[in-house]
Image: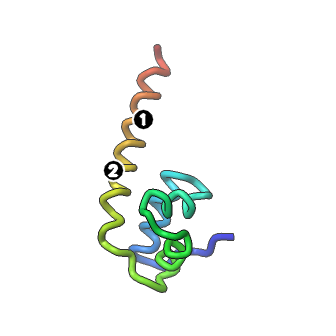
């Protein structure tokens, strides 16, 4: 069971993770960020600060997802 993320960066991290990977986002975030999933849990709870380096890989993943969605939408009418 996943707890409600702390406000601010922890909530933003959870929101982005959920958009990208759904309910199992903790595991996927830990893989793309190269950290243990316990670290992601600590960030979400606000126990430790979310480091600045996490936002760039997440931005890249979001842009890739956006492009994938555009491709799928474009091919729906074909």
Number of numbered tags placed on the structure image: 2
Spatial separation of the CA atoms under disc 1 and disc 2: 12 Å
Percent coordinates x, y for residue 35 in the rendering: 46, 68
Q: How is the image coloured?
A: rainbow
Residue 55 quadrant: bottom left
- The residue that disc 2 covers is 60
Percent coordinates x, y for residue 36 in the rendering: 52, 70
Residue 57 quadrant: bottom left
Query: Secondary structure beneath disc 1?
Result: helix
| Residue nearest the viewer, comparing 44 with 15 | 44
Contact? badges 1 and 2 (CB < 8 Å): no
Query: Secondary structure beneath disc 2?
Result: helix
Percent coordinates x, y for residue 6 in the rendering: 49, 79
Residue furthest to the top in view is: 78
Image quarter of the N terminus = bottom right
Q: Residue at x 62, y 75 (%)?
A: 3
Q: Residue at x 34, y 74 (%)?
A: 51
Mark 1: few/some/many CA within 10 Å (<14, 14-19, 20+): few
Does 7 sit above or below residue 30? below
Mark 2: few/some/many CA within 10 Å (<14, 14-19, 20+): few
Residue 52 quadrant: bottom left
- The residue that disc 1 covers is 68
Residue furthest to the bottom in view is: 47
Mark 2 or mark 1, which is nearer the start of the sequence? 2
Tell me: 50 left or right of 46: left
Does 16 sit above or below residue 39? above
Percent coordinates x, y for residue 58 in the rendering: 38, 57
């Amino acid at each position: 069971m996943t707890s409600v993320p702390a406000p601010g960066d922890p909530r933003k991290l959870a929101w982005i993770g959920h958009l990208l990977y759904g309910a199992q986002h903790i595991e996927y975030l830990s893989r793309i960020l190269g950290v243990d999933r316990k670290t992601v849990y600590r960030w979400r709870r606000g126990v430790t600060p979310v480091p600045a380096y996490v936002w760039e890989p997440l931005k890249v993943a979001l842009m890739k997802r956006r492009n994938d969605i555009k491709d799928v939408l474009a091919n729906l009418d074909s």
